[in-house]
Amino acid sequence: MKKKIVLLLVSLLLVSFMSTAVMAQDENYEKEYTYVINTMNVDSLLEDPRLDLIKEKFNVDFEFRPVNWGNWDEKVRIWTASGDMPDVMWTDLQNKFTEYVNWASQGAYKPIPKFGDKYPNLQAIRDKLKSDDYWEINGELYAMPVPMGTVDWRDPLVDTFNFIYRVDWAKEVGLFNKDHEYSWDEMVEMAEAFIEKNPGENRKTIGIGGIGWAWPWFAGLRQTHQMNTYTVKDGEYVWAPAQPEFLAGIKETKKLYDQGIIWEDQPIANNDAAKNKFIAGELGIYFDNISVGDYSGIMNSITAADKNVELADVSPMFVTSPKGNYFAEEILDHWSATIYNPEMSDAKLARWLEIENYMAGKKGQRLSTLGIEGKDYQIDENGEVEILWEKDEDGNLINPYDTGVRFFQLTTMHDEFDLNNPNLADKIKNDVKSILRRKLEDDVYVKPQPYEVTWFAGDDYTRYNSRLGDTMAEVSDVIVSTNSMEELENKWQEYIDSKRDTVDIILEELNQELLKE
Amino acid sequence: MKAKINNLLSSIFEHKYIYLMLVPGLAFLLVFKYFPMYGIQLAFKRYMLNEGITGSPWIGLENFLYIWSEPAFWRAFKNTIVISLMKLGLGFPIGIILALLINELKMKKYRRFLQTIYTFPHFLSWVIVSGIIFNFLGNTGALNSLLENLGLGQINFLMNKGIFRYLLVYSEVWKEAGWSTILYLAAIAGIDPTLYEAATVDGANRWHKIKYITWPGIQNIVVIMFIMTVGSIMVAGFNQVFNLYNEVVYDVGDIISTYVYRISFQQAPDYGVSTAVGLFNGVVNFMLLMIANTVAKKFGKSGII
């Protein structure tokens, strides 16, 4: 008996020693792991000293697969389907829940272990996510969403889509409103005046244009509140494109297009074409997702392109919808996610999660946004951050890093930092804040995010919903190629009727599954 | 039987270097054309990543029934055939005519210069060509600026359904006509020059020589090229259409390959459905090829099979 107890104790000691040794090895990161990751701006990233710091700190190396906005989705789909996923795959899972469920349930993704106390910063992210419950499939988490909306006062989390316009032109044509608030008709009137009076002294001035992918919904269709594909009306789900509000939005857009108020090349323009026209001083009113990064890019370019243009000459334009009220949409609480190769070992994934956990913490966030401690910033005796970036001749701080590098935003977006970014002019930050704050005022109708539909993955919905993927192409078609409103209505009705069978199958499932209670 | 095999083997051994030259071509065909046919079974399966192609469950003709009930598929099918036939009818003869005209040029240097000019666009990718077309025909492009300055108003070339297919046909003619003349000029070069000399002695003019010597001399190659073109009718030119089309002209410009691309890579992918579309496309193509071959033989010309 004594012998057995001794043996047991020795065994326990041995196991404990071994596990301690293993832990010590992990904590010291003795084994180097190389991670294959897809990301953007790889050239800048490879020269970024912050990357070296992470490599050194966690004893890891990286191989990057470059993607760009044009091929990101396609590459992710091909890698997933062919089993050739990077170890860490950065993917846009916005409104692609059926794909997520489909691939995850087929074993395409590696399940992520519970975070608990081991990764407290990641757990904190999950705790804050409104969509958190939706991400688990049969009790397993397969993706780490990148949260948005870290700014507390953004509640509810609404979109940043907005018009911006040339204030100096508005003054010149005598239609400027001091508070930048305009009714829909006033905006149209201003666009007409820009075209007719040509304050930009162009061969031809364009009234309204927008970022390419947002056509055709930005110019009236969106503001009719019917952009969510399925919405509850009178107690049951309906298909938004078949509703009269949707048709009203199409007709409003056609009216503006036919009048030449919307840029005639908008339907075939690439993403940045209208933005470039705005920067070049050929377009008066521009619609886009006005994030701090995009807005500062526009402001820097427009002031650089024309020395007579000052920051004060461009401003957000607060426009009521054709319905007469202000409109905003609640957005999803995340943007993009990371997913992991199922072949990756648990230990390798654990090391990556440690990196993510670090990046989600205070130090990691500073590394992402400010740079390296001691070189780019320091903490003074009061615990305040002092930025050490170089300054330009006007005394403005110069960010030494490429802000387009997505690698440092794989854990969380930096929206709070962006809104207070020290190297941006106050005017830029205040303009973006003004958009966000305007959308939170009492007179704004905020269309709620239909989480239950966004995350629905019923069999029929999964199978048939892609058949309706050409709806916006059809909208574009009826706007451009019909010769009268009557013809537009008839053609649109034909399209709606042609989709009726498919839509009915989907609606039946949605009504059964989501409204059964 | 044994003797036949022995004969074959000894023949192969005798011409071993010629057979050796076949190897790269055969390897190419095997690797890129025949081995991938293994995936055709997906057209009859619901693809499951964890089961692989072989292990995925069979679902019979479900994928085909799905696409046949989809109006967008039939629109793409119709567009593919119409655009290909337009290219065949309006574009195919251009290469032949151009070759005959170039052949009639007396000044060798000028002839070479023209050949170079005509052939050059073939080496431009459709991405570049579409850029040129957008800049030339766009609403703010060179042609519309000219029309506007002349007081004639704008023409929306790129979003006009009535124009778009012609745009495809003639942009391809511009890009490829010069290249296609190479084959016909080579065939013309193979015609015995004494025939032309004899015709001259007999008092034949240029038209007579083209009609009675050049044309019969290249007829076989024209027929073969025709059959090959008919055999690729279901391939209406993905690169070209993809770079030139837009949502407004889907009705007249969306072809099978752009449709497959969209359902495979631009929305939640269903590889069974994509494969079914591809297989259906291939079968129709094969049938058209056989019909063209049979018709050519009936008219007394040599086919390709």
Image (cartoon, coloured by chain):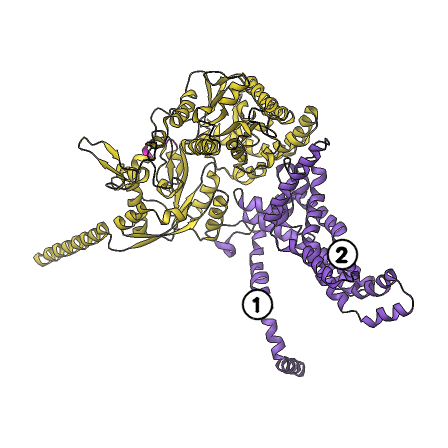
Q: Earlier in the sequence, mark 2 or mark 1?
A: 1
- The residue to which callout 2 is attached is B98
* Residue drawn where x is 51% and y is 55% of the image: B53
User: Is residue B305 among the parts visible in the rendering?
Assistant: no
> Whole-percent x and y of residue A331?
44, 29
Bin the neighbour count of mark 2 within 10 Å (Cα to Cα): few under 14, some 14-19, many 20 and up.
Answer: some
Instruction: Answer above or below: position of B73 versus A185.
Output: below
Q: Magenta span covers which residues?
A: A126-130
Is A128 included in the stretch rendered in magenta? yes
**Mark in front: 2 vs 1:** 2
Given the image, on which type of amino acid does mark 2 rest?
Answer: Leu
Question: Do pointers 2 and 1 mark residues of a single chain?
Answer: yes
Instruction: Residue B27: give its label.
Output: 1
Q: Magenta segment, principal secondary structure?
A: helix
Chain identifier of the residue bearing label 1 in the image: B
* Residue drawn where x is 79% and y is 69% of the image: B191
Q: Is A106 positioned to the left or the right of A196 in the image?
A: left
Compare residues B90 and A237 and report the one nearer the observer.
Answer: B90
Is A246 included in the stretch rendered in magenta? no
* Quadrant hosting residue B286: bottom right
Instruction: Answer above or below: position of A175 versus A253.
Output: above
Instruction: Residue A262: give its label.
Output: none
User: Is residue A363 among the parts visible in the rendering?
Assistant: yes
Quarter of the picture holding the N terminus of chain A: bottom left
Per the image, label 2 sits on a secondary structure element best described as helix
Chain B: its colour in the image is purple
Bin the neighbour count of mark 1 within 10 Å (Cα to Cα): few under 14, some 14-19, many 20 and up.
Answer: few
Compare residues A120 and A402 and report the one nearer the observer.
Answer: A402
Chain in yellow in the render: A
Given the image, on which type of amino acid does mark 1 rest?
Answer: Ala
